[in-house]
Image: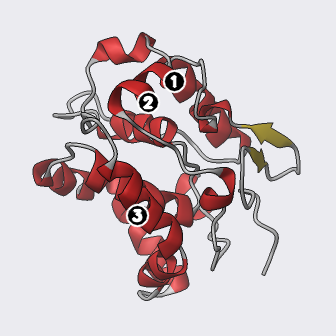
């Protein structure tokens, strides 16, 4: 297996050229505002050679913006394992609706990514990712049960100027530790086939 440019744990992520980037939003008590953390997340995407996906102007809801907000609020990167763990945070710890889920499934970039993942890695890669990371997923379920209230997936704009520490305290969000977040990677999927 090739060395992953996405890193294997913690707050440091390695770019394609080997340079590392610290992800401050992965700290439980980050003093970044949600807006600043989303900006850092977008810099991270550029750092690893991925483009920031945006919603079309006529979109009914801002699926990508809200998705990016959950990445920073719940402290995850964009490895397949990080995305799988984020799925559990969103399904168990937010008010994400089935109508939003169905709209999300219609996003062309997501359809292209799903097709690329299955085409390159096979249909069984998704259950394998969940199975190999079941300890982290189970911890997410336990953490979401301790939340004071569910995160509003379509969060109000006033949240953008509040710190992550404050939002996490209000909602009772306890991030996974670096060790819990460390993925059991089964692949080094190359996102560039859908990000260029």
Q: Is residue 110 left or right of residue 41?
A: left
| Marks 3 and 2 in Cβ contact (< 8 Å) | no
Q: Is residue 161 left or right of residue 153?
A: right
| Marks 2 and 1 in Cβ contact (< 8 Å) | yes
Badge 3 crowding class, 10 Å Cα cut-off, few under 14, some 14 to 19, many 20 or more, is: few
The dot on residue 165 is 1
Q: CA distance from mark 3 to mark 2?
A: 33 Å
* Position in image of residue 13 (x %, y %): 75, 48
Badge 3 is on which residue? 112
Q: Secondary structure at mark 1?
A: helix
* Residue lying at 27% horizontally and 27% vertically, measured from the top left: 155
Q: Quadrant of the N terminus?
A: bottom right
Which quadrant would residue 12 be assigned to in this image? Answer: top right
Badge 2 is on which residue? 168
| Front residue (pair 54, 165) | 165
Badge 2 crowding class, 10 Å Cα cut-off, few under 14, some 14 to 19, many 20 or more, is: many
Q: Secondary structure at mark 2?
A: helix
| Front residue (pair 129, 101) | 129
The dot on residue 44 is none
* Residue lying at 36% horizontally and 25% vertically, measured from the top left: 170
């Amino acid at each position: 297996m090739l060395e992953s440019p996405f890193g294997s744990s913690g707050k440091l992520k390695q770019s394609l050229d080997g340079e590392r980037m610290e992800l401050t939003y992965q700290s439980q008590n980050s003093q970044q505002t949600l807006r600043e953390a989303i900006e850092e997340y977008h810099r991270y995407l550029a750092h690893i050679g991925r483009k920031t996906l945006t919603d079309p102007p006529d979109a009914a809801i801002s699926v990508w913006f809200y998705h990016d907000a959950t990445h920073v609020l719940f402290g995850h990167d964009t490895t397949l394992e990080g995305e799988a763990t984020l799925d559990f945070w969103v399904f168990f710890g937010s008010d994400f609706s089935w109508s939003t889920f169905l709209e999300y499934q219609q996003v062309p970039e997501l359809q292209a990514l799903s097709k690329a993942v299955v085409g390159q890695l096979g249909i069984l890669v998704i259950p394998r990712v969940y199975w190999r990371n079941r300890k982290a997923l189970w911890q997410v379920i336990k953490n979401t049960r301790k939340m004071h209230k569910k995160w509003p997936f379509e969060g109000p704009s006033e949240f953008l100027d509040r710190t992550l520490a404050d939002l996490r305290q209000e909602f009772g969000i306890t991030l996974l530790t670096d060790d819990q977040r460390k993925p059991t990677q089964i692949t080094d999927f190359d996102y560039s086939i859908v990000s260029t």
